Structures are given as structure tokens and as C-alpha cells.
């Protein structure tokens, strides 16, 4: 693997994330779930699925994510996940609050 990050657009991320959620089973889907909606409250994610999600994110971006700087709340919405771990320049923004 190269040392450069993979560039993943928001639409690519959303498609990969939706496929990931469907693969979790239990009838989970992203249907009707917006980018700012809490994924835990919507029944899309739970603490066990976050571990699988971390592997997906690392695969998409081509680098490990720094879990020491990420709280479980960072995985609460697709907007937070994308902005923290996936979008361009996000490596320096891990754990950043606006």
C-alpha cells in the first residue's frame, strides 16, 4: 500500500457506507437516514458494528485511523464520519470540534 491517502468523494463514501450497512443484516438500511441523523438512535449502528466500520474506513482511505483521538460520538452520523476520517485533509482533523 502506498503512503498516500485514497481520495474518496462523499457520494462514493455514501454508497460504500450504505452497502456496509446492508451487509450488517437484521434489516438495517440507510433508507430515510440523513447525513446528520444519529446512526445509533436510528438503529443503523451499534458498538459491535463500529469495529467493522473502522476496518471499512481504513480500507477506503488507505491508512489506519487514530482511535486515540476518536470518541464513539465521532461515529454518530455519516457527516461526522466522513468529515473526521474520509474527507480530504481529515487526518489532521481527527477529534476536532467546530
Image: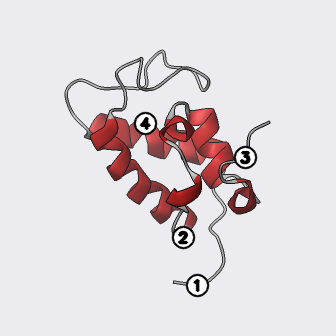
Front one among 59 and 51: 51
Say left or right for 80 vs 16.
Answer: right
**Labels 3 & 4 near each other (Cβ < 8 A):** no
Q: In screen coordinates, is 36 left or right of 44?
A: right
Q: Which mark is residue 16?
A: none
Which element carries disc 3, helix, strand or loop? loop
Q: Is residue 67 above or below residue 32?
A: below
In the image, residue 69 lies at what x, y percent?
59, 55
Kind of element beneath mark 2: loop
- Pointer 2 local density, CA inside 10 Å: few below 14, some 14–19, many at least 20: some
Real-space CA distance between mark 3 and mark 1, rounded to the nearest whole angstrom: 26 Å
Mark nearest the camera among 3 and 2 is 3
Q: Which mark is on residue 62? A: 2
Mark closer to the chain start, 3 or 1: 1
Q: Are marks 3 and 2 in contact (CB under 8 Å)?
A: no
Which label belongs to residue 18? 4
Tag shown at residue 2: 1
Tags 1 and 2 touching, CB below 8 Å: yes
Q: Nearer the viewer, residue 31 or 42?
A: 42
- Residue closest to the far front: 68
Dot 1 or dot 4, earlier in sequence: 1
- Within 10 Å of disc 1 (Cα), the crowding (few <14, some 14-19, many 20+) is few
Describe the element under mark 4 as helix, strand or loop. Answer: helix
In-front residue for pair 12/43: 43
Q: Which residue is mark 3?
A: 96
Amino acid at each position: 500500500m502506498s503512503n498516500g491517502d485514497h481520495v474518496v468523494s462523499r457520494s462514493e463514501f455514501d454508497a460504500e457506507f450504505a452497502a456496509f450497512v446492508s451487509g450488517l443484516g437484521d434489516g438495517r438500511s440507510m433508507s430515510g437516514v440523513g447525513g446528520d441523523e444519529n446512526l445509533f438512535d436510528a438503529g443503523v449502528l451499534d458498538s459491535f458494528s463500529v469495529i467493522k466500520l473502522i476496518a471499512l474506513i481504513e480500507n477506503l482511505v488507505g491508512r489506519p485511523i487514530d482511535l486515540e483521538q476518536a470518541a464513539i460520538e465521532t461515529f454518530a452520523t455519516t457527516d461526522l464520519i466522513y468529515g473526521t476520517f474520509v474527507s480530504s485533509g481529515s487526518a489532521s482533523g481527527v477529534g476536532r470540534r467546530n
